Amino acid sequence: MKTEITHSSDVERQFEVIATFEDMAGDIDKAIRTQRMRTTMKGFRPGKVPVQLVKKIYGKALSYGVAEDLVQRTFQEEVLHNDAFDIMGQPTISELEFDYEAQGDLRAVVTFGVRPVFELEDISRVTLHRLEHEVTEDDIRKEIDVLRAGQADIIPDEGPSTAESYVVVDLERLEEGELVDGTRQADVPFLLSDENLMPQLKEALTGVSAGDETTVTFPGQDGEDRTYAITVKEIKRRELPELTDELVAEITDGKVDTVSGLEEEVRTQLEEGWKKRSRELFEGDVIDTLCELHPFQIPASVVEMYQDAYVEELKKRGNDDKLPEGFDVEGYKASRRDEAELQARWMFIRDCIIESEGIEVTEDDMEKHYEEMAEGAGFPVDMLKKYYGSMPQMLQNVRERMLSDKVFAWITDRTTVIDADVEEYQKAAAEKS
């Protein structure tokens, strides 16, 4: 038997195996004898079917199984257990040639990915923007008004409608200026303050009164615009209840019982929300920037590993961990290929930083994490440790998150970071894109 490893790219290797029929003959005979013992056939006692008949029926399939086992076993011995190769992703048998009937030689190729080798680029001249937002009294008031809106009365209004109005309309499709039969939708309500309302509709329904007629045109997904005739039926407005301690207790189910307490609670939630948003946006910008600076090749098997993970994640959202019938798996994977490649590239960059800088999560780090978590949850530290100890995957996820935090901190220390408000951040993002 002969083996050879060739480089198909910087991150792809091919392991070729060539074996003669004699190399496999013993294993093939053994597989046939085993199959004979399992075979039952009319006219023969169990396990007594003639060997030649077993060969005729099962020989080809069994020999291919032996061939695949030989290739996999040889790959494990010469490559997988060889420290010279840092294998990434799932190795695959990309070629297998074997003629059982002619007792020919076996030729097989295993394709596998290896970890990219690259140098970290100098990031000292990199400038990153980090979103910074100070929660204002106006922010708090708007958030509380949303809570009040849940208890609001909807009352008729003479109009004209404003950006806060409810507008009830009849809709009917127009084609070449004529109403289309069967397309009328009656008494359709729209809240003009809804952020998800299409801008064309919001513009058409702002400033109207009951009895008004107008039209609205939407861009169609097929490239053809769609126009609708609108008849305004009613204008309504929300009448917010007075903000009192009693109302606060009602909308919070008694968790907060004063207006000042609600204001403080809302402030805390908004600050935590902005902090989370800022961190996620900043980390995303870091990843995008460093991936652009490091355009090394990525093993196809690693990209596919992430694509497969997206599919599995999608399955978990469905019923019985299954995808809908007829779902285009390959199309879905293709649609997320760029995302998978970005995630794979960042994984390699992150690993390189961790290794080159000796970044690690120490026992002191874990102890501090336990103490902070215990304080926030109101549990004893020992109980929390025991819980994490019983959930090894969760514990590993915590360690990985802490490692990532240290990597982002390392990058932040070596780049120029500009804290920017929402307007400045959006401007910087637009200039970058």
Image (spheres, grey):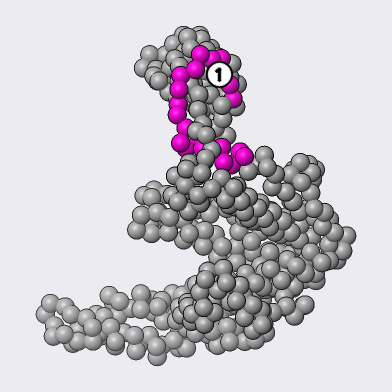
- Where the N terminus falls, by quadrant? bottom right
Q: Looking at the image, which residue sits at the far left?
A: 43
Q: Relative to residue 287, is residue 96 drawn left or right? A: left
Percent across and percent down for residue 361 are 66, 79
> Within the image, what quadrant is residue 306 found in?
bottom right
The magenta-colored residue range is: 141-163
The answer to whether residue 30 is seen in the rendering is yes
Within the magenta stretch, is there residue 72? no
Percent across and percent down for residue 228 are 49, 17
Out of 142 and 412, give the one closest to the viewer: 142
The answer to whether residue 328 is seen in the rendering is no
| Tag count | 1
Percent across and percent down for residue 155 are 45, 22
Q: Residue at x 78, y 66 (%)?
A: 411
Q: Relative to residue 201, is residue 415 drawn left or right? A: right
Q: Which residue is drawn at 42% across and 14% down?
A: 180
Residue, disc 1: 161
Within the magenta stretch, is there residue 161? yes
Under mark 1, the amino acid is Ser
Figure check: 268 above or below 103: above
Percent across and percent down for residue 404 are 67, 69
Out of 295 and 153, give the one closest to the viewer: 153
Q: Residue at x 57, y 50 (%)?
A: 261
Q: Is mark 1 on a helix, strand or loop?
A: loop
How crowded is the residue under tag 1: few (<14 C-alpha within 10 Å), some, or many (20+)?
Answer: many
